[in-house]
Image (cartoon, rainbow, N blue to C red):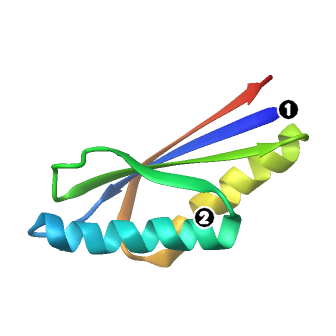
Amino acid sequence: MVVGLGIITFRLNDCRSLKSKRKIVKSVISRLQNNFNASVAEVDSNDIYDEAIIGFAFVGNDKAVVNSKIDKAFSFADGLGLAEIVNTEMELINI
């Protein structure tokens, strides 16, 4: 079994409040969940209005397939155009 973890750090240039941040973060999370059937959550920087860190996870049998899904999720999040991606991290764990 392979577990793939991805973390995306976003810079939210147009946000001036936590309310406007929440709108963008909820949109990104719901779109990732709907398109990839992944577990997605905001994992850090909850009280910082101009930064969002979103984590997601995939589970599968094949390392190459899980790696491909993570790469596609990174590309999808970038293609949304809701926020600027500052950093991405990926980890694959074999169990």
6 to the left or right of 67: left
Sort mark 2 into few (<14), some (14-19) or many (20+) by Cα contacts within 10 Å.
few
> For numbered disc 1, what is the local secondary structure?
loop
Q: Residue 1 bears which disc, if any?
A: 1
The picture quadrant where one finds residue 23 is bottom left
Q: CA distance from mark 2 to mark 1?
A: 24 Å
- Residue at 15% across / 64% down in the picture? 18
- Residue at 25% across / 64% down in the picture? 12
| Picture quarter with the N terminus | top right
67 to the left or right of 43: right
Amino acid beneath label 2 = Ser
- Residue 83 visible from this viewpoint: no
Sort mark 1 into few (<14), some (14-19) or many (20+) by Cα contacts within 10 Å.
few
How far across and how far down the image is residue 86, in percent?
37, 52
How far across and how far down the image is residue 85, in percent?
41, 58
Outermost residue on the right side: it is 62
- Residue at 68% across / 54% down in the picture? 71
Q: Would you place residue 89 above or below residue 46 in this image? A: above
- Residue 44 visible from this viewpoint: yes
67 to the left or right of 85: right
Q: Residue 86 bears which disc, if any?
A: none
How far across and how far down the image is residue 47, in percent?
16, 49
Foreground mark, 2 or 1, reads 1
- Residue at 49% across / 76% down in the picture? 80
Q: Would you place residue 75 above or below residue 24 in this image? A: above
> For numbered disc 2, what is the local secondary structure?
helix
How far across and how far down the image is residue 11, in percent?
28, 58
The picture quadrant where one finds residue 16 is bottom left
Q: Residue 75 bears which disc, if any?
A: 2
| Picture quarter with the C terminus | top right
Amino acid beneath label 1 = Met
Q: Say whether disc 2 or disc 1 marks the residue closer to the N-terminus.
A: 1
